[in-house]
Image (spheres, rainbow, N blue to C red):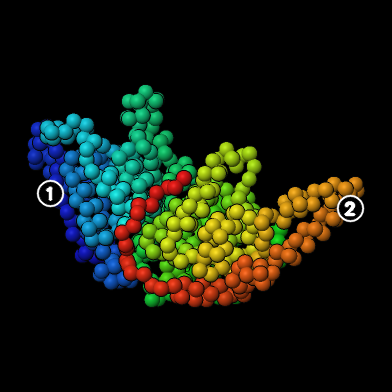
Amino acid sequence: MDTGSFVEYGQLAVAAQRQRQKYEDLQINTAADGVITGTATINRDLFGKDRGQVAVVIYDYSVLAGTQGYFHHKKLDRIFDIAEDLKLPVIMYTEGGGGRPGDVDVRTMIAGLNLKSFFTWAKLSGQVPRIAINNGFCFAGNAAFFGCADITIATRTSWIGMAGPAMIEGGGLGHYKPTEVGPIDVQEKNGVVDIVAEDEADATVIAKKLLSYFQGPIGNWSCNDQSALRYIVPDNRRRTYQVRKAIQVLADKDSFMELRRGYGPGMVTGFIRLEGKPIGLIANNCMHLAGAVDAEGAEKASRFLQLCDAFDMPILSLTDTPGFMVGPESETQAAVRRMSSLFVSFASVTVPVVAIVLRKGYGLGAMAMTGGSFLTPVYIAAWPTGEFGGMGLEGAVKLGYKKELAAVEDGAERKALFDKLVAAMYEIGKATEAAAHLEIDAVIDPADTKEVILKALNAVPKREGPFKQRRNFVDTW
Protein backbone atom coordinates (compact mmCIF):
# COMPACT_ATOMS: atom_id res chain seq x y z
CA MET A 1 0.00 0.00 0.00
CA ASP A 2 1.10 3.56 -0.57
CA THR A 3 2.66 4.99 2.57
CA GLY A 4 0.14 6.54 4.94
CA SER A 5 -2.92 5.59 2.87
CA PHE A 6 -4.31 2.68 4.90
CA VAL A 7 -7.59 3.11 6.77
CA GLU A 8 -8.36 0.05 8.92
CA TYR A 9 -11.83 -1.32 9.61
CA GLY A 10 -12.66 -3.46 12.65
CA GLN A 11 -9.31 -3.18 14.36
CA LEU A 12 -10.65 -3.90 17.86
CA ALA A 13 -12.48 -7.12 17.01
CA VAL A 14 -11.60 -10.25 18.94
CA ALA A 15 -12.78 -13.85 18.65
CA ALA A 16 -16.30 -14.53 19.91
CA GLN A 17 -14.95 -16.57 22.80
CA ARG A 18 -15.46 -14.39 25.85
CA GLN A 19 -17.12 -17.29 27.67
CA ARG A 20 -14.00 -19.40 27.22
CA GLN A 21 -11.20 -16.90 27.73
CA LYS A 22 -10.49 -13.65 29.49
CA TYR A 23 -11.08 -10.56 27.36
CA GLU A 24 -7.50 -9.42 27.92
CA ASP A 25 -6.22 -12.74 26.59
CA LEU A 26 -8.47 -12.47 23.58
CA GLN A 27 -7.12 -9.00 22.84
CA ILE A 28 -3.59 -10.40 22.80
CA ASN A 29 -4.15 -13.80 21.16
CA THR A 30 -7.05 -13.09 18.79
CA ALA A 31 -6.29 -9.53 17.70
CA ALA A 32 -8.59 -8.24 14.94
CA ASP A 33 -10.14 -11.76 14.93
CA GLY A 34 -7.47 -12.99 12.56
CA VAL A 35 -7.99 -10.70 9.59
CA ILE A 36 -6.95 -7.13 8.76
CA THR A 37 -9.32 -5.20 6.51
CA GLY A 38 -9.41 -1.67 5.20
CA THR A 39 -8.97 0.69 2.28
CA ALA A 40 -5.83 2.25 0.86
CA THR A 41 -4.23 3.39 -2.37
CA ILE A 42 -1.86 1.34 -4.51
CA ASN A 43 0.14 2.75 -7.45
CA ARG A 44 -1.09 6.26 -6.63
CA ASP A 45 2.05 7.77 -8.14
CA LEU A 46 1.12 6.25 -11.52
CA PHE A 47 -2.65 6.71 -11.57
CA GLY A 48 -3.58 9.35 -9.00
CA LYS A 49 -5.61 9.07 -5.83
CA ASP A 50 -8.96 8.15 -7.39
CA ARG A 51 -7.80 5.29 -9.61
CA GLY A 52 -5.40 4.15 -6.91
CA GLN A 53 -8.15 3.38 -4.38
CA VAL A 54 -8.43 -0.28 -3.33
CA ALA A 55 -9.81 -2.48 -0.58
CA VAL A 56 -7.45 -4.87 1.19
CA VAL A 57 -7.95 -8.07 3.17
CA ILE A 58 -4.95 -9.64 4.89
CA TYR A 59 -5.29 -12.90 6.79
CA ASP A 60 -3.14 -13.05 9.91
CA TYR A 61 -1.84 -16.60 10.33
CA SER A 62 -0.36 -15.70 13.71
CA VAL A 63 -3.92 -15.40 15.05
CA LEU A 64 -5.58 -18.81 15.44
CA ALA A 65 -3.91 -20.00 12.20
CA GLY A 66 -5.84 -17.45 10.16
CA THR A 67 -9.13 -19.25 10.81
CA GLN A 68 -12.51 -17.67 10.13
CA GLY A 69 -14.74 -16.76 13.06
CA TYR A 70 -17.99 -14.86 13.67
CA PHE A 71 -16.64 -11.29 13.85
CA HIS A 72 -14.01 -12.17 11.26
CA HIS A 73 -16.81 -12.81 8.74
CA LYS A 74 -18.62 -9.63 9.73
CA LYS A 75 -15.44 -7.69 8.92
CA LEU A 76 -15.23 -9.39 5.54
CA ASP A 77 -18.87 -8.59 4.77
CA ARG A 78 -18.27 -4.95 5.63
CA ILE A 79 -15.24 -4.49 3.41
CA PHE A 80 -16.78 -6.44 0.51
CA ASP A 81 -19.90 -4.26 0.66
CA ILE A 82 -17.71 -1.15 0.60
CA ALA A 83 -15.77 -2.52 -2.38
CA GLU A 84 -19.04 -3.10 -4.23
CA ASP A 85 -20.51 0.30 -3.38
CA LEU A 86 -17.36 2.27 -4.23
CA LYS A 87 -16.19 -0.01 -7.07
CA LEU A 88 -12.84 -0.68 -5.42
CA PRO A 89 -10.49 -3.44 -6.58
CA VAL A 90 -9.71 -5.93 -3.81
CA ILE A 91 -6.36 -7.45 -2.87
CA MET A 92 -6.59 -10.42 -0.51
CA TYR A 93 -3.85 -12.42 1.24
CA THR A 94 -5.50 -15.77 1.99
CA GLU A 95 -3.21 -17.80 4.27
CA GLY A 96 -5.33 -19.65 6.83
CA GLY A 97 -6.97 -22.84 7.99
CA GLY A 98 -10.65 -22.27 7.15
CA GLY A 99 -13.64 -22.22 9.49
CA ARG A 100 -13.23 -21.99 13.26
CA PRO A 101 -15.49 -24.12 15.50
CA GLY A 102 -14.73 -22.53 18.88
CA ASP A 103 -16.70 -19.24 18.80
CA VAL A 104 -19.07 -20.22 21.63
CA ASP A 105 -20.38 -16.70 22.32
CA VAL A 106 -22.73 -16.92 19.34
CA ARG A 107 -25.88 -18.51 20.81
CA THR A 108 -28.15 -17.82 17.84
CA MET A 109 -26.11 -19.87 15.37
CA ILE A 110 -26.22 -23.61 14.74
CA ALA A 111 -24.08 -24.42 11.70
CA GLY A 112 -23.28 -20.85 10.72
CA LEU A 113 -24.00 -21.55 7.08
CA ASN A 114 -26.17 -18.44 6.79
CA LEU A 115 -23.19 -16.08 6.79
CA LYS A 116 -22.74 -13.92 3.67
CA SER A 117 -18.99 -13.59 3.13
CA PHE A 118 -18.64 -16.15 0.35
CA PHE A 119 -21.69 -14.74 -1.42
CA THR A 120 -20.55 -11.12 -1.15
CA TRP A 121 -17.03 -12.02 -2.32
CA ALA A 122 -18.30 -14.03 -5.29
CA LYS A 123 -20.83 -11.32 -6.12
CA LEU A 124 -17.96 -8.93 -6.82
CA SER A 125 -17.08 -11.05 -9.86
CA GLY A 126 -17.23 -8.91 -12.97
CA GLN A 127 -17.72 -5.74 -10.92
CA VAL A 128 -14.24 -5.06 -9.52
CA PRO A 129 -10.89 -6.79 -10.07
CA ARG A 130 -10.03 -9.23 -7.29
CA ILE A 131 -6.47 -10.48 -6.80
CA ALA A 132 -5.71 -13.21 -4.26
CA ILE A 133 -2.23 -13.92 -2.92
CA ASN A 134 -1.24 -16.96 -0.91
CA ASN A 135 1.81 -18.06 1.01
CA GLY A 136 1.81 -21.09 3.30
CA PHE A 137 -1.28 -23.15 4.12
CA CYS A 138 -4.63 -22.19 2.60
CA PHE A 139 -7.43 -24.63 3.34
CA ALA A 140 -11.23 -24.83 3.32
CA GLY A 141 -12.91 -21.40 3.46
CA ASN A 142 -9.64 -19.60 2.82
CA ALA A 143 -9.13 -21.71 -0.31
CA ALA A 144 -12.68 -20.92 -1.44
CA PHE A 145 -11.87 -17.21 -1.28
CA PHE A 146 -8.62 -17.82 -3.13
CA GLY A 147 -10.33 -19.84 -5.86
CA CYS A 148 -13.09 -17.27 -6.37
CA ALA A 149 -10.61 -14.49 -7.17
CA ASP A 150 -10.17 -13.21 -10.71
CA ILE A 151 -6.39 -13.63 -10.57
CA THR A 152 -4.53 -15.91 -8.18
CA ILE A 153 -0.88 -15.67 -7.12
CA ALA A 154 0.81 -18.21 -4.87
CA THR A 155 4.34 -18.60 -3.59
CA ARG A 156 6.40 -21.74 -4.04
CA THR A 157 5.80 -22.47 -0.36
CA SER A 158 2.02 -22.69 -0.75
CA TRP A 159 -0.37 -25.56 -0.12
CA ILE A 160 -3.95 -24.92 -1.20
CA GLY A 161 -6.87 -27.28 -0.74
CA MET A 162 -10.63 -27.31 -0.19
CA ALA A 163 -9.99 -29.14 3.08
CA GLY A 164 -7.08 -29.36 5.49
CA PRO A 165 -5.67 -32.53 7.07
CA ALA A 166 -8.08 -32.50 10.02
CA MET A 167 -11.18 -32.34 7.82
CA ILE A 168 -9.81 -34.98 5.46
CA GLU A 169 -9.12 -37.33 8.35
CA GLY A 170 -12.47 -36.53 9.93
CA GLY A 171 -14.15 -37.57 6.72
CA GLY A 172 -12.49 -40.97 6.91
CA LEU A 173 -10.25 -40.28 3.92
CA GLY A 174 -6.92 -40.96 5.57
CA HIS A 175 -4.18 -39.12 7.43
CA TYR A 176 -2.11 -36.58 5.52
CA LYS A 177 0.47 -33.98 6.37
CA PRO A 178 -0.44 -30.37 5.48
CA THR A 179 2.36 -30.38 2.91
CA GLU A 180 0.71 -33.31 1.10
CA VAL A 181 -2.47 -31.36 0.34
CA GLY A 182 -2.51 -29.17 -2.81
CA PRO A 183 1.21 -28.42 -3.24
CA ILE A 184 2.14 -25.66 -5.66
CA ASP A 185 3.40 -27.97 -8.41
CA VAL A 186 -0.05 -29.57 -8.55
CA GLN A 187 -2.03 -26.34 -8.34
CA GLU A 188 0.06 -24.62 -11.00
CA LYS A 189 -0.40 -27.41 -13.54
CA ASN A 190 -4.15 -27.68 -13.02
CA GLY A 191 -4.77 -23.94 -13.43
CA VAL A 192 -5.70 -23.09 -9.83
CA VAL A 193 -2.76 -20.68 -9.61
CA ASP A 194 -2.30 -18.03 -12.30
CA ILE A 195 1.20 -16.95 -11.32
CA VAL A 196 3.77 -18.65 -9.09
CA ALA A 197 5.89 -16.21 -7.09
CA GLU A 198 9.15 -16.86 -5.29
CA ASP A 199 7.96 -15.45 -1.95
CA GLU A 200 5.49 -12.94 -0.51
CA ALA A 201 7.65 -9.96 -1.45
CA ASP A 202 7.75 -11.14 -5.06
CA ALA A 203 4.01 -11.89 -4.97
CA THR A 204 3.30 -8.37 -3.76
CA VAL A 205 5.29 -6.80 -6.59
CA ILE A 206 3.42 -9.01 -9.06
CA ALA A 207 0.06 -8.06 -7.56
CA LYS A 208 0.79 -4.35 -7.84
CA LYS A 209 1.76 -4.77 -11.47
CA LEU A 210 -1.33 -6.86 -12.24
CA LEU A 211 -3.56 -4.28 -10.56
CA SER A 212 -2.04 -1.56 -12.73
CA TYR A 213 -3.49 -3.05 -15.92
CA PHE A 214 -6.96 -2.48 -14.50
CA GLN A 215 -6.11 1.00 -13.27
CA GLY A 216 -5.51 2.37 -16.77
CA PRO A 217 -2.84 3.61 -19.19
CA ILE A 218 0.53 4.97 -18.13
CA GLY A 219 2.39 7.90 -19.63
CA ASN A 220 5.97 6.69 -19.33
CA TRP A 221 6.78 3.73 -21.56
CA SER A 222 9.46 2.49 -23.89
CA CYS A 223 9.40 -0.12 -26.62
CA ASN A 224 11.68 -2.49 -28.45
CA ASP A 225 12.90 -2.24 -32.03
CA GLN A 226 9.82 -3.46 -33.89
CA SER A 227 11.81 -4.52 -36.95
CA ALA A 228 12.87 -7.60 -34.98
CA LEU A 229 9.36 -8.97 -35.55
CA ARG A 230 10.26 -9.56 -39.21
CA TYR A 231 12.63 -12.37 -38.22
CA ILE A 232 10.58 -14.25 -35.61
CA VAL A 233 8.63 -16.65 -37.83
CA PRO A 234 10.96 -18.95 -39.82
CA ASP A 235 10.81 -19.06 -43.61
CA ASN A 236 10.41 -22.82 -43.34
CA ARG A 237 6.74 -23.25 -42.44
CA ARG A 238 7.48 -26.56 -40.71
CA ARG A 239 9.82 -25.01 -38.16
CA THR A 240 8.66 -23.81 -34.74
CA TYR A 241 9.46 -20.52 -33.03
CA GLN A 242 8.97 -18.85 -29.65
CA VAL A 243 5.73 -16.85 -29.72
CA ARG A 244 6.67 -15.29 -26.37
CA LYS A 245 9.63 -13.70 -28.11
CA ALA A 246 7.22 -12.04 -30.53
CA ILE A 247 5.11 -10.85 -27.60
CA GLN A 248 8.12 -9.45 -25.76
CA VAL A 249 9.21 -7.48 -28.84
CA LEU A 250 5.70 -6.21 -29.61
CA ALA A 251 4.82 -5.16 -26.06
CA ASP A 252 6.20 -2.17 -24.21
CA LYS A 253 9.35 -3.11 -22.33
CA ASP A 254 8.70 -5.09 -19.14
CA SER A 255 4.93 -4.99 -19.68
CA PHE A 256 4.12 -8.62 -20.54
CA MET A 257 2.53 -10.44 -17.58
CA GLU A 258 1.54 -14.02 -18.37
CA LEU A 259 -1.21 -15.93 -16.55
CA ARG A 260 -1.47 -19.71 -16.09
CA ARG A 261 1.75 -20.50 -17.92
CA GLY A 262 1.84 -23.99 -16.40
CA TYR A 263 -1.71 -24.83 -17.50
CA GLY A 264 -2.83 -25.30 -21.09
CA PRO A 265 0.69 -24.63 -22.46
CA GLY A 266 -0.54 -24.47 -26.05
CA MET A 267 -2.31 -21.19 -25.27
CA VAL A 268 -0.60 -18.05 -23.98
CA THR A 269 -2.76 -15.61 -22.02
CA GLY A 270 -1.74 -12.43 -20.26
CA PHE A 271 -1.56 -8.66 -20.21
CA ILE A 272 0.64 -6.31 -22.21
CA ARG A 273 0.88 -2.59 -22.79
CA LEU A 274 1.18 -0.90 -26.17
CA GLU A 275 2.36 2.69 -25.81
CA GLY A 276 1.19 2.53 -22.21
CA LYS A 277 -2.30 1.19 -22.99
CA PRO A 278 -3.29 -2.07 -21.22
CA ILE A 279 -4.42 -4.90 -23.50
CA GLY A 280 -5.42 -8.50 -22.88
CA LEU A 281 -3.62 -11.00 -25.09
CA ILE A 282 -4.20 -14.57 -26.23
CA ALA A 283 -1.75 -16.38 -28.50
CA ASN A 284 -1.10 -19.85 -29.85
CA ASN A 285 2.13 -21.52 -28.83
CA CYS A 286 3.40 -23.56 -31.79
CA MET A 287 5.96 -25.25 -29.51
CA HIS A 288 3.07 -27.30 -28.06
CA LEU A 289 0.99 -29.50 -30.38
CA ALA A 290 2.07 -27.22 -33.25
CA GLY A 291 -0.25 -24.57 -31.84
CA ALA A 292 -3.41 -26.68 -31.99
CA VAL A 293 -6.14 -25.45 -29.63
CA ASP A 294 -6.72 -28.25 -27.11
CA ALA A 295 -9.34 -28.52 -24.39
CA GLU A 296 -7.19 -26.99 -21.65
CA GLY A 297 -6.03 -24.14 -23.87
CA ALA A 298 -9.57 -23.31 -24.96
CA GLU A 299 -10.80 -23.33 -21.37
CA LYS A 300 -7.92 -21.12 -20.29
CA ALA A 301 -8.52 -18.58 -23.06
CA SER A 302 -12.28 -18.60 -22.51
CA ARG A 303 -12.03 -17.52 -18.89
CA PHE A 304 -9.40 -14.91 -19.72
CA LEU A 305 -11.65 -13.36 -22.35
CA GLN A 306 -14.40 -13.00 -19.76
CA LEU A 307 -11.99 -11.26 -17.40
CA CYS A 308 -10.91 -8.76 -20.07
CA ASP A 309 -14.47 -8.06 -21.14
CA ALA A 310 -15.66 -7.52 -17.58
CA PHE A 311 -13.23 -4.64 -17.16
CA ASP A 312 -13.32 -3.07 -20.63
CA MET A 313 -9.86 -4.24 -21.65
CA PRO A 314 -9.40 -4.64 -25.44
CA ILE A 315 -8.23 -8.03 -26.66
CA LEU A 316 -5.41 -8.92 -29.04
CA SER A 317 -5.25 -12.39 -30.59
CA LEU A 318 -1.95 -13.55 -32.08
CA THR A 319 -3.13 -16.51 -34.12
CA ASP A 320 -1.05 -19.40 -35.40
CA THR A 321 -2.99 -22.65 -35.24
CA PRO A 322 -3.62 -25.68 -37.44
CA GLY A 323 -7.05 -25.92 -35.80
CA PHE A 324 -8.60 -27.71 -32.84
CA MET A 325 -6.73 -30.69 -31.41
CA VAL A 326 -8.55 -33.82 -32.58
CA GLY A 327 -8.49 -37.54 -31.92
CA PRO A 328 -9.80 -40.08 -29.39
CA GLU A 329 -7.43 -38.89 -26.66
CA SER A 330 -8.55 -35.30 -27.12
CA GLU A 331 -12.17 -36.35 -26.71
CA THR A 332 -11.43 -37.89 -23.32
CA GLN A 333 -10.78 -34.32 -22.11
CA ALA A 334 -14.33 -33.14 -22.88
CA ALA A 335 -13.02 -31.41 -25.99
CA VAL A 336 -16.41 -30.69 -27.52
CA ARG A 337 -17.67 -28.83 -24.46
CA ARG A 338 -14.45 -27.12 -23.45
CA MET A 339 -13.39 -26.03 -26.92
CA SER A 340 -16.87 -24.73 -27.67
CA SER A 341 -16.60 -22.48 -24.61
CA LEU A 342 -14.18 -20.34 -26.59
CA PHE A 343 -16.91 -19.53 -29.11
CA VAL A 344 -19.39 -18.75 -26.33
CA SER A 345 -17.04 -16.42 -24.47
CA PHE A 346 -15.97 -14.57 -27.61
CA ALA A 347 -19.59 -14.16 -28.73
CA SER A 348 -20.41 -12.31 -25.50
CA VAL A 349 -17.36 -10.03 -25.62
CA THR A 350 -18.22 -6.34 -25.97
CA VAL A 351 -14.67 -4.95 -26.01
CA PRO A 352 -12.84 -4.46 -29.32
CA VAL A 353 -10.84 -7.40 -30.63
CA VAL A 354 -7.87 -7.19 -33.01
CA ALA A 355 -6.45 -10.35 -34.56
CA ILE A 356 -3.03 -10.75 -36.16
CA VAL A 357 -2.37 -14.07 -37.91
CA LEU A 358 1.33 -14.81 -37.56
CA ARG A 359 1.33 -17.97 -39.66
CA LYS A 360 -1.35 -20.68 -39.66
CA GLY A 361 -5.04 -19.82 -39.69
CA TYR A 362 -6.87 -23.09 -40.25
CA GLY A 363 -10.33 -24.40 -39.52
CA LEU A 364 -12.49 -24.02 -36.47
CA GLY A 365 -9.47 -23.40 -34.25
CA ALA A 366 -8.54 -20.24 -36.16
CA MET A 367 -12.16 -19.10 -36.10
CA ALA A 368 -12.28 -19.66 -32.33
CA MET A 369 -9.08 -17.64 -31.89
CA THR A 370 -10.57 -14.68 -33.78
CA GLY A 371 -13.97 -14.40 -32.12
CA GLY A 372 -15.81 -17.16 -33.95
CA SER A 373 -15.39 -15.58 -37.36
CA PHE A 374 -12.82 -13.57 -39.28
CA LEU A 375 -15.52 -10.89 -39.42
CA THR A 376 -15.68 -10.52 -35.63
CA PRO A 377 -12.49 -8.50 -34.94
CA VAL A 378 -12.53 -4.78 -35.58
CA TYR A 379 -9.44 -5.52 -37.64
CA ILE A 380 -7.79 -8.76 -38.73
CA ALA A 381 -4.47 -8.79 -40.55
CA ALA A 382 -1.77 -11.31 -41.32
CA TRP A 383 1.98 -11.25 -41.55
CA PRO A 384 3.36 -12.27 -44.96
CA THR A 385 3.95 -15.75 -43.47
CA GLY A 386 0.19 -16.19 -43.01
CA GLU A 387 -1.54 -19.18 -44.55
CA PHE A 388 -5.21 -20.11 -44.51
CA GLY A 389 -7.56 -22.97 -45.18
CA GLY A 390 -10.64 -24.81 -44.00
CA MET A 391 -8.30 -27.39 -42.45
CA GLY A 392 -4.57 -28.10 -42.33
CA LEU A 393 -3.02 -28.47 -45.76
CA GLU A 394 -1.64 -31.97 -45.28
CA GLY A 395 -4.94 -33.26 -43.94
CA ALA A 396 -6.87 -31.51 -46.68
CA VAL A 397 -4.74 -33.19 -49.37
CA LYS A 398 -5.01 -36.62 -47.76
CA LEU A 399 -8.76 -36.27 -47.49
CA GLY A 400 -9.54 -34.42 -50.71
CA TYR A 401 -7.15 -36.30 -53.01
CA LYS A 402 -7.42 -39.73 -51.46
CA LYS A 403 -8.29 -41.49 -54.73
CA GLU A 404 -5.61 -39.74 -56.76
CA LEU A 405 -2.92 -40.61 -54.21
CA ALA A 406 -4.09 -44.21 -53.92
CA ALA A 407 -3.87 -44.60 -57.69
CA VAL A 408 -0.11 -44.00 -57.61
CA GLU A 409 1.54 -47.33 -56.80
CA ASP A 410 5.14 -46.14 -56.42
CA GLY A 411 5.76 -44.74 -52.95
CA ALA A 412 8.24 -42.09 -54.05
CA GLU A 413 5.94 -40.91 -56.82
CA ARG A 414 3.01 -40.82 -54.39
CA LYS A 415 5.00 -38.64 -51.98
CA ALA A 416 6.04 -36.36 -54.83
CA LEU A 417 2.40 -35.95 -55.85
CA PHE A 418 1.41 -35.33 -52.25
CA ASP A 419 4.08 -32.62 -51.84
CA LYS A 420 3.03 -31.03 -55.13
CA LEU A 421 -0.62 -30.88 -54.06
CA VAL A 422 0.30 -29.42 -50.66
CA ALA A 423 2.43 -26.74 -52.33
CA ALA A 424 -0.40 -25.86 -54.69
CA MET A 425 -2.87 -25.52 -51.83
CA TYR A 426 -0.35 -23.41 -49.92
CA GLU A 427 -0.14 -20.97 -52.85
CA ILE A 428 -3.92 -20.73 -52.96
CA GLY A 429 -4.16 -20.08 -49.20
CA LYS A 430 -1.35 -17.55 -48.85
CA ALA A 431 -2.07 -14.42 -46.84
CA THR A 432 -2.05 -12.20 -49.92
CA GLU A 433 -4.70 -14.40 -51.56
CA ALA A 434 -6.87 -14.35 -48.43
CA ALA A 435 -6.60 -10.55 -48.34
CA ALA A 436 -7.38 -10.29 -52.05
CA HIS A 437 -10.58 -12.27 -51.46
CA LEU A 438 -11.40 -10.00 -48.45
CA GLU A 439 -11.31 -12.87 -45.96
CA ILE A 440 -8.87 -10.77 -43.93
CA ASP A 441 -8.42 -7.00 -43.90
CA ALA A 442 -4.74 -6.72 -44.79
CA VAL A 443 -1.28 -8.23 -44.99
CA ILE A 444 1.11 -6.10 -42.99
CA ASP A 445 4.82 -5.66 -42.42
CA PRO A 446 5.44 -7.34 -39.02
CA ALA A 447 7.35 -4.22 -37.96
CA ASP A 448 4.10 -2.24 -38.29
CA THR A 449 2.08 -4.58 -36.06
CA LYS A 450 1.94 -2.33 -33.00
CA GLU A 451 0.99 0.71 -35.07
CA VAL A 452 -1.75 -1.22 -36.87
CA ILE A 453 -3.20 -2.53 -33.60
CA LEU A 454 -3.28 0.89 -31.96
CA LYS A 455 -4.86 2.56 -34.99
CA ALA A 456 -7.56 -0.09 -35.10
CA LEU A 457 -8.30 0.31 -31.38
CA ASN A 458 -8.25 4.11 -31.56
CA ALA A 459 -11.00 3.96 -34.19
CA VAL A 460 -13.34 2.38 -31.61
CA PRO A 461 -15.42 4.92 -29.61
CA LYS A 462 -14.22 5.29 -26.04
CA ARG A 463 -16.30 3.83 -23.23
CA GLU A 464 -16.79 5.22 -19.76
CA GLY A 465 -15.03 3.50 -16.84
CA PRO A 466 -13.24 2.56 -14.76
CA PHE A 467 -15.58 -0.34 -14.03
CA LYS A 468 -19.18 -0.77 -15.11
CA GLN A 469 -21.65 -3.15 -13.54
CA ARG A 470 -21.80 -6.33 -15.59
CA ARG A 471 -23.02 -9.84 -15.32
CA ASN A 472 -20.78 -12.06 -13.23
CA PHE A 473 -18.27 -13.90 -15.39
CA VAL A 474 -18.07 -17.60 -14.70
CA ASP A 475 -16.38 -20.61 -16.20
CA THR A 476 -18.67 -21.35 -19.15
CA TRP A 477 -17.44 -24.90 -19.45
Res 271 visible: no
Quarter assignment of residue 350? bottom left
Image mark for residue 413: 2
Q: Residue at x 26, y 60 (%)?
A: 87
Which of labels 2 and 1 is toward the front?
A: 2
Residue picked out by circle 1: 12
Spatial CA distance of label 2 from label 1 is 85 Å
* Total tally of numbered discs in the picture: 2
- Mark 2 and mark 1 lie on one chain; the one further toward the N terminus is 1
Q: Are marks 2 and 1 in contact (CB under 8 Å)?
A: no
Residue toward you, 338 or 8:
338
Q: Whole-percent x and y of residue 472?
A: 35, 52
Q: Amino acid at mark 2?
A: Glu
- Where is residue 192 shown, x and y percent of the image? 43, 45
Q: Nearer the viewer, residue 94 or 393?
A: 393
Q: Secondary structure at mark 2?
A: helix
Residue 173, given in percent of the width and then of the height, sits at 39, 25
Tell me the element at label 1. Answer: loop
Between residue 344 and residue 110, name the one nearer to us. Answer: 344
**Residue depicted at x 38% and y 32%:** 177
Task: Give the image location of residue 360, x and y in percent.
Answer: 65, 60
**Horizontal side of residue 131 vs 288, given as left or right:** left
Q: Residue at x 12, y 49 (%)?
A: 12
